[in-house]
Image (tube, rainbow, N blue to C red):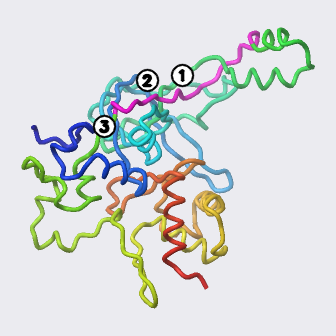
Amino acid sequence: MRNRAYYRIDELSEVAQITLGDLKHAVENEGLSLHAWIKAENLGYVHFWTKKGVGQSVVLRGHFTYKGLIKLSAEDSFDLLVREKKSRVKYFLIEEPWRCSNFRKPYIALEEYSRSDFEFVQDNYLLPEEPFYACGEVQVGKDLFGALKRATKKPAGTFSDFFETVNADDKQSVHIVQMVLEPQNLRFKLDKLTEHFGLDVGLASGLKTAHSRLPNSLKSGLLTEDKRLPNLKGSEERIVTNPIEQIMVRILKDKGKNLSSDQVWRCLRVDIKNVDERIYDTDFVIECMDQNEIVRRSLDGESTVSTGRRRFRNLLVEVKKNFKFY
């Protein structure tokens, strides 16, 4: 087998010394995220922008065609691998920018439309050479959601009158079409499995990963952010390397240890709206956050890590179990 960076799920046993069950367990319980292969046109190059007192906005910087790999969130990975069902994704990370083509600037006058998924447009950017965020297909069409909302505000009549009002509403919107992914789109990155499960995972069939090529003197000292540390009792203190856990500790110490996962999530969403100074995310590791997902910088600063609501809840349980809050 050729030595590649990404493999299909059915190739797992040929390149790694773990089972499919191990992989599913890591996705379901440890927040491991996978990748997916896509082929799509008119995707949007987007930027997440935060302004103090306003919150997070989505900026459209261009359109492009892509045939390559994207990085999924832990939640989407769970749906596709563990639940074996389709998943709809709106935003994702382009892993292979050199496979992008047909880039066009976004000549869209947002003020001409009744509704838009974008706050504003920037037409002075080119596609980055490093991985960047994108959204599903950008379409301009009938503002059906707005039409339904406007129709409900008019005097009540028959159902026929209601739908006639909706059909007559010709206002347009700029919206993002969610991309539908299926389990066969899934791929895994061998080096990521090596980091998550241990340094000898990727040695099946004689394949070598970036970690397996490290000198032995360096291997013993490696500690990755995804490795689980043992639960420590008594006076021993658990070392935290996961930035999300560090932020959780700060919130619980400030607001109280009995906060629920949803309450901690809301505290963090308020915190990241601050551009100049954050109370809990003091190192500004979180790049963007919505109601379903957190995207932060990795420990090496060279990539990003996604944390969904399920993974967030599991992390909070671990934090409450391993720390005493006085």
The segment highlighted magenta reads: 167-185
Q: Earlier in the sequence, mark 2 or mark 1?
A: 2
- Which residue is tagged 1? 139
Residue at 83% over, 14% down: 162
Residue denoted by label 2: 42
Horizontally, residue 99 falls left or right of residue 121, namely: left
Residue 316 is tagged as none
- Report the side of 320 relative to 254 (left or right): left
Q: Circle 2: is it few (<14), some (14-19), or many (20+) Cα within 10 Å?
A: some
**Coordinates of residue 192 in the picture (x, y in percent):** 27, 52
Classed neighbour count for the residue bearing mark 1: other residues with Cα under 10 Å, few (<14), some (14–19), many (≥20)? some
Q: Can you give x and y, in whole percent of width and height, for residue 305 in the image? A: 40, 54
Please, which residue is most extreme toward the bottom here? Answer: 235
Q: Position of residue 257 (x, y in %)?
A: 63, 75
- The answer to which of marks 3 and 1 sits earlier in the sequence is 3
Query: In the image, what residue type sits under mark 2?
Result: Asn
Q: Is 181 colored magenta in this rendering?
A: yes
Q: Answer whether residue 257 is magenta in the image.
A: no
